[in-house]
Image (tube, grey):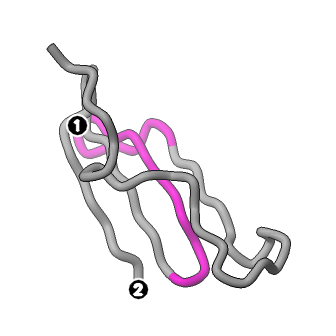
């Protein structure tokens, strides 16, 4: 099961981020339809112990909104 966070995107739609032991990803949704989806496997990250995804959680990102 993946942990998921969703927030209004900077433009239109909803920005969704998720992470599990095996996968990390993000999506952009608008009107209950996924417009863009990217998924990355942790298993292909060079088998480095303690590898941490470079995709940041919403709470850790800088906000450039005015």
Instruction: Give the magenta-colored segment's residue range.
Output: 21-36
Q: Residues within 10 Å of mark 1 (few under 14, many from 20)?
A: few
| Whole-percent x, y for residue 31 in the image | 22, 37
Q: Label 2, on which residue?
A: 1
Whether residue 18 sits left or right of residue 53 in the image: it is left
Of all residues shown, which one is farthest toward the top?
66
Kindly identify the residue that appears in the image at 57 percent across and 62 percent down.
53
- Looking at the picture, does residue 3 appear above or below residue 13? below
Verify whether residue 15 appears in magenta: no
Q: Which dot marks residue 5?
A: none
Q: Earlier in the sequence, mark 1 or mark 2?
A: 2
Q: How many marks?
A: 2
Q: Residues under labels 1 and 2: Cα distance?
A: 25 Å
Front disc: 1 or 2: 2
Whether residue 48 sits left or right of residue 29 in the image: it is right
Q: Which dot marks residue 31?
A: 1
């Amino acid at each position: 099961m993946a942990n998921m966070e969703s927030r209004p995107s900077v433009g239109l739609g909803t920005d969704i981020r998720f992470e599990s032991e095996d996968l990390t990803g993000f999506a952009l949704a608008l009107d209950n339809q996924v417009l863009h989806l990217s998924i990355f496997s942790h298993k292909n990250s060079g088998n480095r112990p303690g590898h941490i995804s470079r995709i940041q959680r919403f709470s850790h990102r800088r906000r450039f909104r005015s």
